[in-house]
Structures are given as structure tokens and as C-alpha cells.
Image (cartoon, coloured by chain):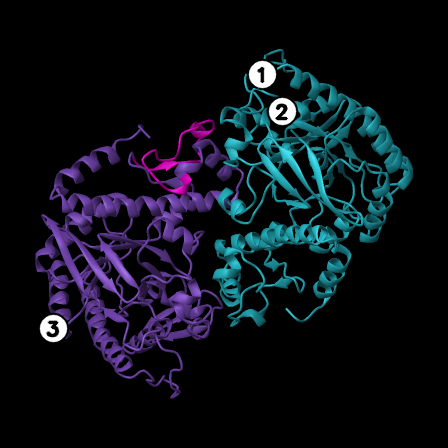
Chain colours: A cyan, B purple
């Protein structure tokens, strides 16, 4: 369980296969984001149709509403969402540090204000792990302290050190829960809900590497994470948080030779097409991002020739599909003219159809990258892809 | 083409089959409403999955946006919506008379203010027919003057007389268009788009009976409509516009023996479950209404035990389906607890899942009525259905 097999490489790019309790994920892979236990505007059937193999949900959001106890009573996150394939839950650190409102970081954890009811709540490393255990995703993430994009060395070091101390606490609590199926909750009551339907332990915990834009901090953080335990995967956090793209690419390039070769590498929060290609070139295996659904709801569609704004008047009478190369329901069924009408007329179906296409676009992009890596042809493929994608005016 | 065959009766209730250019419709039938060329929150695949056989779109809305010329350039309404089964277009009278804003009724037609850009536009009987011809639905409706629900005799007679004069003009124009595939437009240019992909004439025009709540006016209107031509169907308009339910039921009951037995009878704008049953009992064959999708978007679901408001706290941890008797995606996949979460968290998927279920509910209701009529058991079935539906507190 949680085995990662690399099947082919092409330079630093890797094509692999990650075995999880609820199924196998072929990498490189894009994870659609189901923040509140639903990928916005899409159904589980839609996700299956576009080839999603691993879906992310947010611990912070589900804890605040409806609460993990409700999810557990409704059979756990897989049953709740009606998604019987692999799930990953983000620990909530990124949300606590990026949402508006009061927050106070203490060594124990973070006190913050719920965006739903304004009430004060505290998330500690232990609580974040317990909530994720109750939700029951295949992969849980450690609770981290995310520093802002342009943080100086002192701020980034403080956040990194705290993230590492919190990682130890997360790992300890996760081990306790894994060792005992009726481990105690902080209030002394026993867990009544197991993390999954299997009698064996079926959740793994992944650490998150922080360190801002400072390579020495990142390298130190990586070394200390690997000293802390034997992990089944490794996430890179704190990138794509406002810094220039070049900084992210350079950091990935510098980190790549230092990363253990046998662990899946998950670059959190990255999901623009060109970033996926650049990151796979630098050895990344997994990605998640709200961009395809958020942009889709705004009428912006990914295409091999770059983004298309479907609201533009030029699409008014255009009988062509959004993306002639795409096999999704949107592209095989509807004209650009109709899709534009849906957006101009503010019809709900438009939000769904562009979200569906954008998610399919990133999943197909990952599949194309896999194929190019297997053909040992990734550098050439990536150059050709980039030439077409950055070409403007041809869509 | 446009043949209506009655296959069974049970009292005034009829089970039939209406042959249309794009397919056959089994009656009684409920028509989902795609006001702007899309049934709100649902895709054509959803409509197919819930068993929709005939879908309604609105001439007024499509004329105002994107305009029938755009729809024609994109291949006509069927292709535009990606719905290759039967379509019916409402002529726009109801919209012009019910939407807010300026309107002036003249003998020629109605001048009104577009709800999109506020611009003044005029719809005449001829234009309404031409627009519908350009859209290319299987069934076009005559342009009528709808009087308000509580209209007195004088107002109702005025609207009825005008509706009948307009019907003559609609029928004349429709005949001209049917007789000549390149009939002239008002601006003198020839039509470049045929109403459908077939070389034969593939659109029929149905009259709308008005007369308010006045049986003598309705009876006179019916007689004059039947004198004006040989129709393939007959619509009953101006009911369910604010008058008490009893008035509508009594009117249908009084009209039924006067209606030609061999024409499909279409009660416009009616779509609450109990109204469908009551109207089928009084010999109606077809219905349309925005209620299932509008109520669905508000979190209200039809069930055999009466409506359920999914936002209610009682559903918070309820693992049961919305309607245990239903075979739709919503009911076979998700718990009430999850559906409530989607609504409380304002997730788009909730709007779609309840719309889907409500449309399926009415289509299944129509299918159950067909079965009961075929079994010559409709009165008993209707009583049993009503006893359960009006029972409260058991859902």
C-alpha cells in the first residue's frame, strides 16, 4: 500500500504509478480540488468521465462546515462525496494562513476565525491529523505554517522551524491513530468511526516542505524532514504564493537533485498548464489547483493555443468547439457560440461545461506528458507544446 | 407526422403517443423548460437520463438574446442546444405580458422593453411565427394576448378576441413559410436557413385557448379556434396565472367534454405534482413548468410524501436518499445530509442535483399515470397518490 513505482524517466521528468487504498494514480497527475467536499460545478460522474484519479478536499472547510463528525456519521468522506477513488485532504494550514480574518499563531497551534460563523477556533497539528483521520482520505497532509510569498529569511526560518516541530507532532498523532483503531479523542471519548472500511490502516501522512524562496532553508528543511521518518510521499508547499514564476521554477530545479528519487513529489496549489509542464520537467509528479474550475466559472478556457475567454464577442456565431483536440462532453457536444450564450445569459450550465473542459484539459495534459516521458521524448514534446501554447491569436 | 394516437383511456384520462419530426412523445408528458435554450443547471445528457422526450424553449428570450439569427447560424435550435429530440417553442406572448417593464398592446402586435438591454422591440403575430420558424422547433405556438388571472369579462373578451385575430395571422404566416422554403423575411431578404434538416415541412403550429376564468368565453374561443383550421394540437393558456386552483380544475373539467378527442391538449405553465394529477384526471396530455428547476435551485424537492426542504437542519446527518423510490442520479448516489451540505455551503452541484431530481420526479409521475391509465385504474391510482402526497410529516 502507498507504493510508488517509477516506470519511465526522461531527464528529471518521471512517469509513475502510485498505489493507494482506493485505487491507483498514474503520474504525472493533476488533482481536481473539491474544497467543500465537491469539485465546484462537477459531479463525481463528471470527475470519472474526465479521468480524475485522485481528488483533493480541504480539512479546514470541512471542519468548519459541516464538521468532520457529520461527515463521519454519513460514512466518511468517500461516501459523503460519493467518490470511491483515492482522496487527499489538505491539512488546513494554507487556508488558515490565507483566508481573511483574525489569526494568532502560537507554538501549540493556530487560533483563527471561522469564515462561516465568525467563531474562534483552534487548529493544532494533532487536531488537524485527527480531523483528517476522521474524514478518512487515502492521503493526509501534515499541518504546516505557510509564510507569505516574499517572506525574508528570518520569517521563512521561523515558519520552517515551526512546520518541522509541528510535523513531529502530526506524525506522532498519526502513528497513535494508526496503531489503535479506537484511539482517544482530546475530549477523552473513543473514536467511533474508523478512517475507512478496511480493517488495515489505510491512510498515510505526507510532510510539507516549506522554506520560502530560500534554497538553503529548503535544503535544510528537506534534510530534517527525511531524518524525521520514512515517508510515502513529499509535498512542496509555499510556492506559487505570489512570487515570480521564475523563482518557483528555479527552486524546483535546485531542489530536484536533492529530493529522494523513490517518493512521489507533490507541488501544492499549482495548476496552470504551463506551470504543470515546467514542473514535470523539474521532476514533479502531482499537482492540485482551483484554477481550472475557478477560471472555468469566469468563462476562461484552457486550449492548446492558450487561454480563450468565451465571453468575447468573436465567439458569438462560432460553430467550432472550444478545443478541437479535446474529447470532453463540452467540446464534443457544444459550439463556442452556444457556450458564449450560456455565459452572457448567466446560465448555470456554462459554469459546469467550462469547468469540466478545464479539468479534462489538465488531466489530458498530464496523460500526454506521461506518454512523452514513456517515449523518452519529453524535452522535445515540452518545447513543442510550449511553442503552440504561448502562440497567441490562433485560437 | 404530428399524429396523435390515443392508446388507452381511464375516465377522461388518456394515454397516448405524439409523433413529431424529432421523435415520439408518450403522453401524459411533462416538458422541462429551457427558457434561454438550456434547462437551468441541466445538460442535454441529464435530460436524456431523466427521460425527457419534449423540451420547451422561449421565443421571447432567444429572440432578445442571442437572437434567432445567431441560433440559425449555429445550426438551428436543436443543434444550438445539442438536443436532437422534439422541441416546442412558446411564442413569447406570456413573457411579454408577464415580465416587468414597458409594454403597449396594439392591434398590430406588442411593443415592449427588452429585459436585457432595455431597448424597445415589437413582436407581432407574424414575427413570432417567423422567429419560431427560424429557431426550428417541432412545435411552434401561436402568439397570444394573455389577460391577468383575475381579469373581468370585458378584459378577458378583449384579450380573447385579439388572440383569435392574431391566431389567424399566425396561421397564415406559418402556412406561407411552410409552402415556401425560401419565404421572404419582413426586410425582403430570403430565408437562408430552413427550419430543420429535412426537405419536408417539419414544424406544426398550435393555437392557444384564452378566455380567463369565464367558461362561456373559453367555450366560444374553442369553437372559433376549431373553425379557423385543422390543428395538430391545442394549448390551454391563461390558467395557473394567479387564480385559485379550484378555478383551474373546474375550468378544465367543464372544458373537457367540449375538447376534440383526437388532439393532444397542452396545459401551459402547469407543473406542480398535484396539478399534473388533477389535470390528467381532467383529460390533459402535456404540461410544462419551471417549478421543478426553480424549486430545485431553492432547495425544495418533490417526493411522493410531499415537498422536502433540503436546507432544514433535520437532514444534517440523514444518510437516506432524497426520495427512496426514485431512480435518478441524485437519489441513487447522495445522502440527504450531503445534499443539505451542498445547499448550506452554496455549492453549484446542489442546484443541479435537486433540479435533476425534480424533473425526474415529474417525468416518472407522468409515466406512472400512463401505466395507471393503461391498466384502466387511473381514478384509484390518483386517489392513492393524493393520499400519500398530501400526508405531511412522513417524508
Front residue of A383/B203: it is A383
Q: Are marks 1 and 3 on the same chain?
A: no
Per the rendered image, the range of residues in magenta is B306-330
Q: Secondary structure at mark 1?
A: loop
Badge number at residue B227: 3
Q: Main secondary structure of the magenta part?
A: loop
Expressed as whole percent of the image width and height from the top left, the position of residue A287 reads 69, 44
Residue that lies at the very extreme toward the top in this rendered image: A188
Left or right of B291 in this view: B115: right
* Circle 3: element type: helix
Label 3 to label 2, Cα distance in Å? 74 Å
Q: CA distance from mark 1 to mark 3?
A: 77 Å
Report in which chain the residue with disc 3 lies.
B
Mark 1 = which residue? A191
Q: Residue at x 28, y 71 (%)?
A: B203
Q: Is residue A134 above or below residue B201?
A: above
Q: Residues within 10 Å of mark 3 (few under 14, many from 20)?
A: few
Residue under numbered circle 2: A133
Asked whether the beta carbons under mark 1 and mark 3 sit within 8 Å of each other, the answer is no
Position of the N terminus of chain B by quadrant: bottom left
Q: Residues within 10 Å of mark 2 (few under 14, many from 20)?
A: many
Closer mark to the observer between disc 3 and disc 2: 2
Q: Is residue A57 shown in magenta?
A: no
Q: Position of residue A378 (x, y in %)?
A: 74, 55
Residue drawn 26% across the image and 54% down it: B287
Whether label 1 touches label 2, CB < 8 Å: yes
Q: Earlier in the sequence, mark 1 or mark 2?
A: 2
Work out whether B8 lies above or below B74. above
Amino acid at each position: 500500500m502507498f507504493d510508488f513505482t517509477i516506470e519511465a524517466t526522461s531527464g528529471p521528468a518521471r512517469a509513475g504509478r502510485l498505489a493507494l487504498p482506493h485505487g491507483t494514480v498514474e503520474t504525472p497527475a493533476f488533482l481536481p480540488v473539491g474544497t467543500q467536499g465537491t469539485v465546484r460545478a462537477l459531479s463525481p460522474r463528471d470527475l470519472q468521465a474526465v479521468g480524475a484519479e485522485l481528488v483533493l478536499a480541504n480539512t479546514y472547510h470541512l471542519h468548519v462546515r459541516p464538521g468532520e463528525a457529520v461527515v463521519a456519521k454519513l460514512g466518511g468522506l468517500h461516501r459523503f462525496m460519493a467518490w470511491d477513488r483515492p482522496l487527499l485532504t489538505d491539512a488546513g494550514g494554507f487556508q488558515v494562513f490565507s483566508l481573511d480574518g483574525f489569526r494568532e499563531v502560537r507554538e501549540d497551534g493556530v487560533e483563527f476565525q471561522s469564515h462561516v460563523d465568525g467563531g474562534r477556533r483552534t487548529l493544532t497539528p494533532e487536531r488537524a491529523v485527527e480531523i483528517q483521520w476522521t474524514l478518512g482520505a487515502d492521503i493526509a497532509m501534515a499541518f504546516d505554517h505557510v509564510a507569505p510569498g516574499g517572506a525574508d529569511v528570518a520569517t521563512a526560518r521561523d515558519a520552517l522551524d515551526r512546520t518541522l516541530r509541528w510535523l513531529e507532532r502530526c506524525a506522532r498523532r498519526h502513528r497513535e491513530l494508526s496503531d489503535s483503531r479506537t484511539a482517544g479523542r482530546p475530549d477523552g471519548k473513543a473514536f467511533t468511526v474508523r478512517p475507512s472500511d478496511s480493517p488495515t490502516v489505510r491512510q498515510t501522512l505526507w510532510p510539507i516542505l516549506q522554506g520560502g524562496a530560500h534554497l538553503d532553508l529548503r535544503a535544510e528543511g528537506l534534510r530534517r524532514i527525511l531524518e524525521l521518518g520514512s515517508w510515502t510521499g513529499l509535498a512542496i508547499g509555499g510556492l506559487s504564493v505570489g512570487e515570480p514564476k521564475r523563482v518557483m521554477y528555479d527552486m524546483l530545479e535546485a531542489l530536484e537533485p536533492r529530493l529522494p528519487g523513490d517518493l512521489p513529489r507533490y507541488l501544492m496549489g499549482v495548476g496552470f498548464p504551463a506551470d504543470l509542464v515546467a514542473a514535470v520537467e523539474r521532476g514533479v509528479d502531482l499537482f492540485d489547483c482551483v484554477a481550472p474550475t475557478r477560471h472555468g466559472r469566469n468563462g476562461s478556457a484552457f486550449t492548446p493555443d492558450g487561454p480563450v475567454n468565451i465571453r468575447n464577442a468573436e465567439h458569438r456565431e462560432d460553430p467550432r468547439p472550444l478545443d478541437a483536440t479535446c474529447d470532453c462532453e463540452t467540446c464534443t457536444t457544444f459550439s463556442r457560440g452556444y457556450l458564449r450564450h450560456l455565459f452572457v445569459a448567466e446560465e448555470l450550465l456554462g459554469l459546469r461545461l467550462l469547468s469540466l473542459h478545464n479539468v479534462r484539459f489538465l488531466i489530458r495534459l498530464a496523460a500526454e506528458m506521461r506518454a512523452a516521458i514513456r517515449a523518452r521524448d519529453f524535452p522535445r514534446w515540452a518545447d513543442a507544446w510550449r511553442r503552440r501554447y504561448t502562440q497567441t491569436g490562433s485560437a
